[in-house]
Structure formats: structure tokens, C-alpha cells
Amino acid sequence: IRFGLARAGEIEVTTLDVSPRILDHLTSARTRARSDAGYTLQLPLDADTAGHAWHPDVVAYWRRFGDRIGKDVAPAAAPGDVEGVQMRAVRLDPKVVDAVASRDLNIVLERLQPSTDAGRFDLIIATNILVYYDVFDQTLALANVAHMLRPGGLFLVNSPMFPLPQMHLAAPQPVTVDFDQLGGDTLFWLKKDAAVARLR
């Protein structure tokens, strides 16, 4: 929405997880949203220290996060024994919360089975997930991701992935993201070949 890639009300988000606690939480939030109850995000930001200082771009992002899908409200107080933490809170529009569907799915062993390319995902994000799997499990997960992406869709991950030719994914392209003044993380994006649509 911020970059003009979509308009509010047009985006659908699906979360894939195996944790009943997370799935129940998201389902409950969606139910409350349908009764016009909002959902408030609490956004703490740790204070800078001698060994860690946030990158200015991260701080700027934190200050505006959520301003296109909700409004600022009074945040919860930080715990009394925690010093220097800044707090923000954003109350999300109920329609935004209702647009988030949760599915019980193990990305290594399972995949959604959309009947058409229109039912596949434009973007799949899996950060801090696949890095914990071995190469075999990563390959299975990547095959499932590739199947669930529409032609031309993107996969974003923060561990290098090496797709097999039959997955129709381009080689991973790295992007460095600095989140503090000492370093950051490397993200990789892979694009599904748009020509695969002609192969079906």
C-alpha cells in the first residue's frame, strides 16, 4: 500500500504455521475483527547501547510502521525494570485484520493446492524459518513454495536457497539489509519463471 503496489481492501494475507497457539490467536483476532473490534500492535524499540545502535532507517520505519493500515493509539507501558525502551502502538483497521487467514501447514511436508494460477501467491516470505532446516528439508520446502507461487511471483528468504530446474525459480538474488550500525542480514529473493504458465 505504501509503495502503491496495491490498495487497501485488495490484499489477502495467508499465514502458514504449525503452532496451534499461533493459529488460534490469529483465528480469534479475525473473529473479533468481523464484529468490528480492532487489533492493537504494541511496537517496542530497544534503546541504543554501546554495542548496538539502530540504523536511522530502521528507526524511521518504526516511527511510521502501520500508518497506512491503522492509527496510532496510546501504547502499553514498558515493564518497570526495563529502561530506555520506546513504545508505539497501532490499532489496525478491522478490515485489515479480517484479510489475514491462517492455515495449519508444514511447509516441508505440505502445500496448498490452488486450482488456478489466480489462486497462487504473488509473494511468499519465510524469514528465520528455513535456516533451521537441513539441505534436504530446505529442498522439499522450496519445491512446495515454488508450487504455490504464481508465475512471476517472488519468494523472499534470509538463507541461501538453490532451486532445482524443475522448480522454475531463478537463481537467488541477495539484498543486504542493515538494521543496526554494526550490521544486519542478507535477504535473498527468487522469482518464478513467468514462462512456466505456457508450459501447463
Image (tube, rainbow, N blue to C red):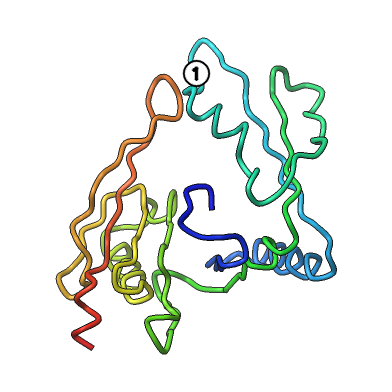
Residue 182: x %, y % from top left:
39, 20
- Please tell me how crowded label 1 is: few (under 14), some (14-19), or many (20+) other residues with Cα within 10 Å: some
Residue 65: x %, y % from top left:
61, 40
Quarter of the image holding residue 138?
bottom left
Q: Nearer the viewer, residue 82 or 113?
A: 113
Residue 165: x %, y % from top left:
14, 71
Residue 60: x %, y % from top left:
55, 28
> Does 14 sit left or right of 85 as displayed?
left
> Does 49 sit left or right of 3 as displayed?
right
- Does the image show residue 52? yes
The vertical placement of 1 against 196, above or below, is: above
The vertical placement of 36 against 88, above or below, is: below
- Does the image show residue 17? no
Q: Nearer the viewer, residue 34 or 108?
A: 34
**Which quadrant would the C terminus be assigned to in this image?**
bottom left
Name of the residue lying farthest toward the top: 50
Q: Nearer the viewer, residue 130 or 151?
A: 151
Quarter of the image holding residue 196?
bottom left
At x 51%, y 10%, the residue is 50
> Does 120 sit left or right of 38 as displayed?
left
At x 54%, y 53%, the residue is 1
At x 27%, y 58%, the residue is 190
- Which residue type does callout 1 highlight? His
Q: Which residue is mark 1?
A: 52
At x 25%, y 81%, the residue is 197
Q: Nearer the viewer, residue 35 or 46?
A: 35
Q: How many marks?
A: 1
Q: Secondary structure at mark 1?
A: loop
